[in-house]
Amino acid sequence: MKIISGIQPSGKLHIGNYLGAIKNWIKLQNDSENECAFFVADYHSITEEFDPKEKPKEILDLATSLLALGLDPEKSIIFQQSQVPGHADLAWIFDTLVKIPELERMTQFKDKAAAQKENINMGLFGYPVLMAADILIHKADAVPVGEDQTQHLELTRDIARRFNNNFGPTFPEPKSLLTETPRIMSLVDPSKKMSKSGGEKSYIALFDSPEIIKEKIKSAVSDTGGGKDKRIGGDNLLAIFDAFAETKEEKNEYSNYKREHADGKLKYSEFKPRLAELIANHFADFRNRYAELSENPDQVKKILDSGAKKASAIAEKTLREAKQKIGLII
Ligand code: AMP
Ligand code: TRP
């Protein structure tokens, strides 16, 4: 399968990103049947407020983190979106196939527009079209993402179908690949998804120290509140435990906690510190590898440069084919 996915360099990676997407990237790359490409979606990230002085650091940090988590340039093409000409060109072509009301319906656009009322820019509006171009320029079959991106994948398939109908078979219709935890919820408001915008205490960043993780899990909302949503906080914490449980013993522990929770007997004073420990242990190697890699930013830049060369060759070919199909090549 041809696989592609991207992530925006806009702050800290959290366990939602990891459990919803990146964990799957590593699994997919390690299957030799797959051809994988993963990228830092820097063009997407400038549709929100940002500091041009911080941006280079955010891009490098994200690339370093992805390598520290196990992305391997020997197995995957790893690149920075804006270093590859073609994505924005193909997005322009796709713009002519998409109707304004379709983009107005996008949930992420509505949420972000509400959050940045003073800056509802064209880039934010066209964000899903650029995403479709990212995917289709690689003719990808499958896209590992969290659940919040599935609507964008539907639009990507619509765009591919429309292009193919109008101009002849060119693009596959890619599907989204979800993990078992496609939507990790916020620790402070479990009715919302975990995200950077929910505040420090709402998410666990991959860089958080074991002490901070312990604190954040300790204060996480569990089974308080009223109504039928009463248990969603506890369910979320259990799902996180399950996702990080690797050994047979840890899986057994999970089954016990789950049963206790179902019976209303879960002791959070025992469960929470154990969950915090499990998460902190999981990222111990990551923290060490990140520290090593960040000693040598030139090596990371080299990997991105070489990834951009490989991705550019693919992008150029597809863009040319698309232009040829629509009659722009004389
Ligand atoms: P973003 O940080 O929005 O660029 O997201 C990067 C990837 O992480 C995308 O595939 C998202 O769908 C995924 N993701 C973000 N937040 C969550 C979450 N709370 N649960 C699961 N996946 C998520
Ligand atoms: N929109 C994605 C997100 O916020 C990031 C992204 C950009 C992406 N282009 C992509 C993901 C192409 C998958 C494929 O998470």
Image (cartoon, rainbow, N blue to C red):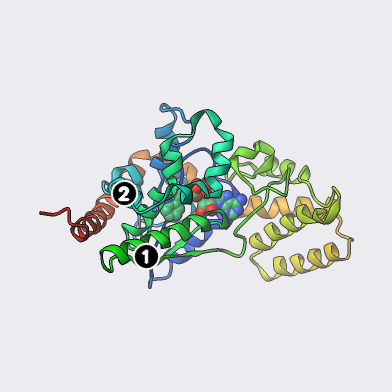
Q: Hey, what amino acid is under mark 1? A: Arg
Quarter in which the C terminus is drawn: bottom left
- What residue appears at the point 48 percent right and 48 percent down from the top-left corner? 101
Q: Residue at x 42, y 33 (%)?
A: 55
Residue 11 position within the rendered picture, expressed as x and y whole percent measured from the top left? 52, 38
From the image, tell me which residue sits under label 2. Answer: 87
* Front residue (pair 203, 269): 203
- Label 1: which residue? 161
> Quick one: which residue is furthest to the bottom in this view?
33
* For discs 1 and 2, the disc positioned in front in the rendered view: 1
| Vertical comparison of 58 with 275: above or below | above
Q: Earlier in the sequence, mark 1 or mark 2?
A: 2
Foreground pick, 76 / 133:
133
Horizontal and vertical percent for residue 240?
68, 57
Q: Nearer the viewer, residue 197 or 58?
A: 197
Is residue 97 in sight in this rendering? yes
The N terminus - image quarter: bottom left
| Helix, strand or loop for disc 2 | helix
Query: How many labels, in total?
Result: 2
Query: Mark 2: which amino acid?
Result: His
